[in-house]
Image: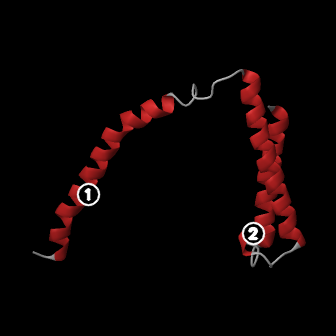
Amino acid sequence: MTDNQMKAPVDYFLFASLLAVLVLAEPALANKFETIGSGVAGSVHIKRESLQTGLLACGIALVVFALLAVIVPRTNAAFLNYVNWKASSAVMGIIGCILLVFYFLV
């Protein structure tokens, strides 16, 4: 037998195993995700306040990081700005502004 002939049954077995895992795990995941909406107890005001807090914190953080990427270009690897600091700053700024807009809309 050649290597390709020996590899084919293994490939079919792995594919069948992956398919079985996905089919068997899907109902368990579906039940888990159905309960997420009712997982946060409290009034609408409390839920809205927690959502606004998260949006505001993430939005401000991303805008600050975008400004830092422009102020100190090519000095911090965390901003991916050794080479493409302009694109990194633009992406973080745009996402930060979108989060802040959602903060004001919620």
Residue at 77% x, 49% y is: 58
Tell me where residue 31 appears, x and y as whole percent: 43, 30
Tell me where residue 95 appears, x and y as whole percent: 76, 52
Say which residue label 1 marks. 14
Helix, strand or loop status at disc 2 = helix
Q: Quadrant of residue 52?
A: top right
Residue 79 numbered mark, or none: 2
Q: Amino acid at mark 1?
A: Leu
Tell me where residue 15 appears, x and y as whole percent: 27, 54
Distance between the alpha carbons at the discs numbered 2 and 1: 39 Å
Quarter of the image where the N terminus is located? bottom left
Helix, strand or loop status at disc 1 = helix
Residue 98 visible, this orientation:
no
Residue 34 visible, this orientation:
yes
Question: Which one is in front, 41 or 36?
Answer: 41
2 or 1: tag closer to the N-terminus: 1
Image height of 73 relative to 53, above or below: below
Quarter of the image where the C terminus is located? top right
Which residue ends up furthest to the top in the rendered image? 43
Q: Is label 2 or label 1 in front?
A: 2
Q: Amino acid at mark 2?
A: Phe
